[in-house]
Image (cartoon, rainbow, N blue to C red):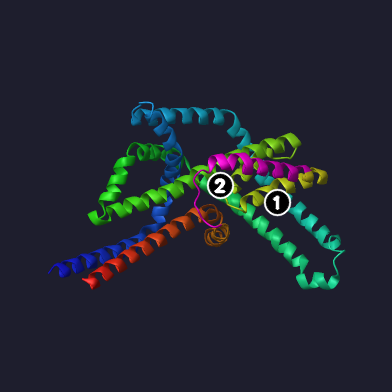
Amino acid sequence: MEKMYIRKLRIIDIVLFILVIIAFIYIRKPLFSVINPFIYALVVAYLLDPFVKMLERRKIKRIWAIVLVFLIIFTVFAVLFATFIPMLSQEVGEFIEDIPGIFESVRKSVENFQLNGFEFIPKEMRDYLNFDKQLENISGYVERFFNGLFGFLVASTGTIFDLVMTPLIAFYYLKDKEKIKSLILNSFPLRYKEFVKRFGNDVNKVLGGFIKGQLTVAFFVGLLTGIGSLIIGIPYALTIGLVAGITNIIPFFGPWLGGILPTVLAFIERPSLALWAIGLLVVVQQIEAAFITPNVMSESVGIHPLLIIFSVLFFGSLFGIVGMILGVPMMAVLLLIIGYIKEYRSELERIKIEKAKM
């Protein structure tokens, strides 16, 4: 009788799961159109929660700690919007207008290099490796990447709706954090609660550590690159800093991708300036590797470097810029799920063996 009851419950669970999948297929477009502020708010909540906890440790009630943190954040953003943001917006707009001219200069440089740059390599070797074609492919890839990056920036900066809803949702995330966790936990049967709680803590550690660490490192790299570009005289220094910060979120490839723009702009301005740009990038990366990352990235995703490279390339091919940025935490969560499935199967095997012995 009990087995039949359990079998019925499982059938109900399977039917509900299938219905949820079908419903998701039908509502995915309207869902994706409103989900952005919830994702942005989750990131904001991750970043602000440590500051709220710090104020709580000083005997300030959580609600007032959240209000105080938001007041500080709004004050900082008000100052930025009054001073820095208008300059950045104007420069990014001018840079976007100038992109066709920049790519035309790059194409001309590539053509000149194709004509004169490979003279020291035997013709047979050039024909076999097809350097001309490879250079065209690299040039096209870089062009597509930066077009995709700026398209991503324009699409993800959001609307007025996102700007209004993101802090509001983040406020409720922070205020009702424990209630939300309890609600999720209570939706699972009692025997799975400890398992779900442990899994949630592991996911939180991976995602929280990655988001806070990568964004903090990206901020400092963008700031140092932008200031350095301004000092040595590379045009569009603010835009360069913004791009360097965003691309630095991408593991392994980010610093190289972020270094392309200042080097190209410096070369177009003056070939000798490109050497200064390369020197600047080397200095910034050394500072980041020696001082910033070791102090900020106290929590890492714990993935082998080869798997990180695969994650960036694989998810990048699937989802573009977003996939390159989120590929590593997605892979980390996937590995966590696989690990828990293996643990669950091992537990089932252990129970089966113990029953067989009885």
Circle on res. 100: 1
Judge from the rendering whether residue 275 lies leftward or rightward of residue 295; answer left or right: right
Amino acid type, mark 2: Val
- Above or below residue 138? Residue 184 is above
Residue drawn at the location 60% of the way across and 48% of the way down? 247
Q: If you read the primary sequence from the N terminus, does the residue marked by circle 1 or circle 2 appear first?
A: 1
- Circle 1 — which element? helix
Residue drawn at the location 63% of the way across and 42% of the way down? 290
Judge from the rendering whether residue 205 lies leftward or rightward of residue 215; answer left or right: left
Quadrant of the image for the C terminus?
bottom left
Camera-nearest residue between 125 and 114: 125
Camera-nearest residue between 100 and 57: 57
Residue drawn at the location 51% of the way across and 43% of the way down? 298
Camera-nearest residue between 102 and 292: 292
Whether residue 161 appears in this view of the structure is no
Q: Image quadrant of residue 334?
A: bottom left
Whether residue 236 appears in this view of the structure is yes
Circle on res. 154: 2
- Circle 2 — which element? helix
Q: Residues within 10 Å of mark 2 (few under 14, many from 20)?
A: few
Judge from the rendering whether residue 116 lies leftward or rightward of residue 249; answer left or right: right
Image x and y of residue 69, in percent: 43, 30
